Amino acid sequence: MRIVSLVPHATELCFALGLGDELIAVTHECDYPPAALALPKVTRDMLAGGLDAAGIDAAVRERVGAGESIYELDRELLARLRPDLIVTQALCPVCAVSYEEVNELAAELPSRPRVISLDPHTIGESLGDVRTIAEATGRRDEGVALVARSAGRIDRVRLAVRRAPRPRVVALEWLDPVFVAGHWTPQLIEFAGGEDLLGLPAESSQQLDWQIVAAARPEIVVVMPCGYDAWRAREEAVAYGPQLRALGAQRIVAVDASAYFSRPGPRLVDGLELLAHILHPGLVEQGAGEALEVELARV
């Protein structure tokens, strides 16, 4: 089967199911596993480089408001590749080429590829996507095994923290303007032994203001700007130090959202283990990823 992935978490899922040899193209943002970097890229970013958080937000709003994608799809390359299956998403217009555009193009391609959209809102739905791709690609056994491993790791975390006090947590997905993380992130925080004060499980991320975040009185603030790694997240936290300090939290921690939180693929379980270690370091080992403390004295 010839597979094109138009969303990073689908690329990760395909590799996790042993479909790496059947992937023939990915997006310019597909950077995991490392083998994905060698594949042809069928998208490119339409936003200008060098923008700060507010500039990125403004540029995205302008393009989405005008009905334009922030990504450009290489239609000619896609036609030459003759895919049998295209995996995309419709959940977020900021995360991938629009679902409508992909469907229209697929209908025009000589190979008439099947289009599957992965749009999970919860951890359970993310695991359901494993089954969807496994069934579509003849990897049912691999899918069953991956779901079982993921569910087992989730259960071990929940068991480890079940009797621990639950710290009050706010997860910030963007800092200018302020967005609190939604979808699967509040569920991750709950499973990790925390109380998410502002995020709504299975709902979109919410734009709030700093006063509302402060009024929630968080003990721990997890800075996870969408698409940023841990070091870039810490830089953002330092840049918005006065606002973060005004929240009165005991700890501010920057994490790699791109790897463990923004993408609802197999590494969400790594994100869960990382969150549980942040909230309960004596009960759960850190595992993959790193959490960078943002010193309040510096902000």
Image (cartoon, helix red, strand yellow):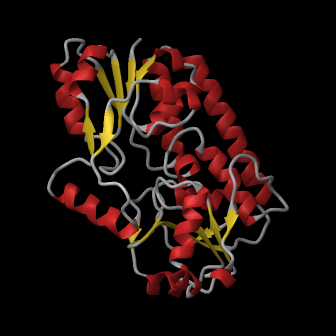
How many numbered discs sit on the rendered protein? Answer: 0
Would you say 223 lies left or right of 165 here?
Answer: left
Q: Is residue 122 above or below residue 169?
A: above
Task: Check the image and report above or below for 245 versus 233.
Answer: below
Percent x, y of residue 34? 58, 31
Is the C terminus in the top left, top right, bottom left or bottom right quadrant? bottom right
**Which residue is found at the position 66% from the left and 79% from the top?**
219
Q: Is residue 136 visible?
A: yes
The residue furthest front is 50
| Residue 61: quarter of image | bottom left
Compared across the picture, whether 237 is left or right of 154 comes to left
Residue beneath the point at 23% across and 15% down: 112
Q: Which of these two is toward me, 187 or 247?
A: 247
The picture places residue 57, in percent across and down from the top left corner, at 33, 64
Instruction: Give x and y (percent) for residue 187.
Output: 56, 57
Q: Is residue 191 left or right of residue 9?
A: right
x, y percentage for residue 159?
A: 77, 53
x 33%, y 15%: residue:
84
The residue most toward the right is 282
Q: Is residue 226 left or right of residue 259?
A: left
Q: Can see residue 130?
A: no
Residue at point 41% right, 11% down? 1
